[in-house]
Amino acid sequence: MHNALLQLNDLSVHYGGIQAVRNISLSLREGEHGTLIGANGAGKSSTVRAIAGLQPYSGDILWRGASIKGLRPEALLQRGIVLVPEGRGIFSRMTVLENLQMGAWLRRDAARVRAEIAALCARFPRLGERQNQLAGLLSGGEQQLLALARAMLSQPQLLILDEPSMGLAPIMVEKIFEVIGSLRATGITTLLIEQNARLALEVTDRAWVMESGTLSCEGRSAELLTDDRIQQIYLGELPV
C-alpha cells in the first residue's frame, strides 16, 4: 500500500513444526486504527509479537517502507513501535510510579516526562493515588490502565494492544475502550487484538479476520459490523 506506515508481506510464524501464521499480508496507514479479530489460536498474538520483534518469522515487515526484519525489540521501540502485551506485562514488584518511569526509559527529556506522568495521574486518579504502591497490588483494570499509560510515555507511533479487555469486569472494559477510543485524537496509529469483536470494530477504521493463521476477510470496520457472517460467528448475533 502506498504510504503505508506498517506493511506485512507474506508473514509466517512457526513454533517448531506448527505453523501459527500462514503468509499473511496487510498494510496500516499512519493515523489509522486497525484490528485483528478471530478465535483463540487464530494467530493474532503471534502476528503482533512478530511485529514487536518478540517472535522470529519468515516473510518481511516494512516500517515506513524499510524492512525491520531481525531488529531487536528495543530498536523497534526506538522507532516508535510499542506493544501492550496480553496479560499487561506490568512490573508487579515495582511501584506504579516506577512502572510509568519505565515507559520513558529511552527518553532524555526528564522535565517533559515528569509533566506527562503528572498529567496521566490526573487523567487516571487511581494511578495518581497509588503511585507509591506496588503495581502488583492494583486490580486487573487498574493494571491495564497502568500498562496503557506506561505505553503512552514511550511516545508510540504505532501502539499495539493485545487483548486489553481480557479478564476485566464489564465496567473496566468500558473504561479501557473509552481510553482506546480517545487515542484517535492523538494521531497515534493503533493495531488492536481483541476477543470482543464488537468493541474492537466500534473503535477502529479497518479490520482483518484471522482464521487458522490466515486472513479470511478484511474491510472497513463499520461494514464488518453489519456483515451477516461476522455477526453470526464473531458477534453472536443472527441476521434479521
Image (cartoon, grey):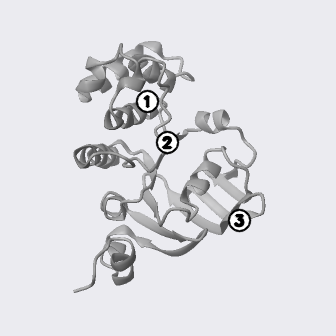
Is disc 2 surrounded by few (<14), some (14 to 19) or many (20+) residues within 10 Å? many
Q: Amino acid at mark 1?
A: Arg
Nearer to the camera, 4 or 133: 133
Above or below, 197 against 78 in this view is: below
Q: Position of residue 34 (x, y in %)?
A: 44, 59
* Residue type, mark 3 in image: Gln
Callout 1–callout 2 Cβ contact below 8 Å: no
1 or 2: tag closer to the N-terminus: 1
Residue 234: % across, % down = 38, 71
Helix, strand or loop under label 3: strand
Residue 19: numbered disc: 3
Q: Amino acid at mark 2?
A: Gln
Question: Left or right: 232 with respect to 66?
Answer: left
Q: Determine the CA span between mark 1 and mark 2.
A: 14 Å
Pointer 1: what residue? 150
Tell me which corner region of the image, top left, top right, bottom left or bottom right, holds residue 139: top left
Label 1 to label 3: alpha-carbon separation: 32 Å
Q: Residues under labels 2 and 3: Cα distance?
A: 29 Å
238 sits to left or right of 165: left
